[in-house]
């Protein structure tokens, strides 16, 4: 056994072997050839309008030129949009994490019966199947423009992400703690409360902070289609050709995301 072909996992004692598409040169080069052929076919068949693209470059330069310097004269409107985005993201994260816990228990095969497990996995798959913008369009059509559509959209988005990772965390818990609870006659609910949840609590806190950070970014995107928040303010600025104010909004979004990323990273480091 050579180190170039295998590597041992020191924690588990298992041996890693190169998969066939790496070890077999014919298969490796065949995959490369198929990939290059597909890329050529894709670029040659897609309907690129190069004349329109060349005409659009001067317009893009005009847009970027009009964005400098950014205008912060309407700081009140900026603050209002950000405040609404934060409220949408916070409420959606709160609801999404709260609903994710029972769904994660349902989707963990070591603590849920097979029919319940399949139902939980189906809920996660459905909530992860659609981009938030598509879901936002559906909710805007259902409940109208405004923050309610944004909250519902990001709640569903949060369930898909948090419930999936929590379910995987539950499936990897130390089962000895659960067996200890069962040996003293604890019921199913007490087993979850005292045997399962304490083991996943650090992971849950970290996921909640990450999801709040993610929802804050997504709230700006779903707002573009009418689901409230600073995204609507940004869309209105572009609609009025107010590029310097739009650039100010973009700078504010970048600054907010940088701050939230730093805070969520610090919290995750402390709890994991």
Image (cartoon, helix red, strand yellow):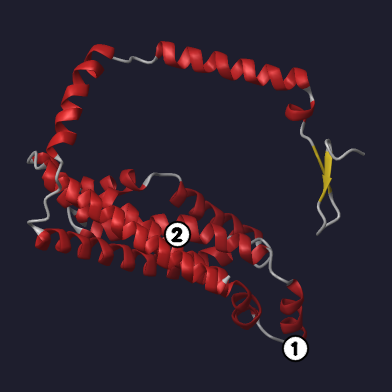
Q: In the figure, residue 2 lies in which quadrant?
A: top right
Describe residue 15's horizontal placement relative to residue 92 as left or right.
right
Local crowd at mark 2 within 10 Å, few (<14), some, or many (≥20)? many
Judged from the image, the secondary structure of the residue bearing numbered disc 2 is: helix
Q: Residue 184, labelled with which disc?
A: 1
Residue 142 drawn at (x, y percent): 23, 51
Which residue in the rendered view is the most extreme toward the front?
Answer: 69
Residue occupied by mark 2: 159
Q: Where is residue 244 shown, x and y percent of the image?
A: 12, 44
- Name the residue located 20 percent from the left edge and 55 percent from the top edge: 230
Instruction: Give the CA distance from mark 2 to mark 1.
Output: 34 Å
Residue 98 in the image: above or below residue 213: below
Choose top left, top right, bottom left or bottom right for residue 94.
bottom left
Q: Is residue 83 above or below residue 192?
A: above
Quick one: which residue is furthest to the bottom in this view? 184
Task: Rate crowding at label 1 as few (under 14), some (14 to 19) or many (20 or more) other CA atoms within 10 Å.
Answer: few
Q: 191 or 48: nearer the eye?
A: 48
Give the x, y percent position of residue 45.
41, 12
Residue 57 visible (yes or no):
yes
Residue placed furthest toward the right: 1
Q: Is residue 227 visible?
A: no
Q: Nearer the viewer, residue 78 or 42?
A: 78
What's the residue at 14%, 45% (across, down)? 69
Would residue 122 appear left or right of 242 to someone viewing this image?
right
Q: Position of residue 23 (x, y in %)?
A: 79, 28
Circle 1 SS class: loop
Classify residue 134 as left or right of residue 11.
left
Q: Quadrant of the N terminus?
A: top right
Q: Is residue 68 above or below residue 229?
A: above
């Amino acid at each position: 056994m050579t180190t170039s072909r295998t590597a041992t996992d020191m924690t588990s004692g298992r041996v890693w072997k190169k998969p066939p598409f790496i070890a077999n040169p014919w298969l490796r080069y065949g995959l490369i050839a198929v990939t290059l052929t597909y890329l050529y076919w894709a670029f040659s068949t897609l309907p690129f309008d190069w004349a329109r693209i060349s005409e659009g470059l001067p317009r893009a330069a005009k847009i970027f030129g009009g964005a400098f310097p950014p205008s912060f004269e309407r700081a009140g409107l900026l603050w209002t949009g950000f405040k609404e985005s934060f409220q949408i993201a916070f409420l959606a994260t709160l609801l999404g994490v709260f609903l994710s816990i029972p769904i994660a228990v349902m989707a963990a095969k070591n603590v849920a019966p097979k029919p319940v497990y399949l139902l939980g996995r189906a809920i996660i798959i459905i909530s992860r199947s659609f981009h938030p913008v598509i879901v936002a369009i559906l909710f805007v059509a259902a409940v109208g423009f405004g923050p309610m559509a944004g909250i519902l959209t990001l709640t569903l988005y949060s369930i898909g992400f948090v419930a999936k990772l929590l379910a995987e965390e539950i499936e990897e818990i130390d089962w000895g703690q659960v067996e200890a609870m069962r040996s003293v006659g604890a019921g199913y609910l007490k087993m979850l409360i005292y045997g399962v949840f304490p083991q996943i609590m650090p992971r849950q806190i970290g996921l909640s902070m990450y999801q709040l950070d993610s929802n804050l970014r997504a709230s700006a995107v779903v707002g573009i289609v009418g689901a409230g928040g600073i995204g609507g303010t940004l869309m209105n600025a572009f609609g009025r050709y107010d590029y310097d104010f739009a650039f100010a909004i973009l700078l504010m979004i970048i600054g907010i995301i940088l701050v939230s990323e730093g805070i969520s990273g610090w919290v995750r480091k402390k709890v994991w």
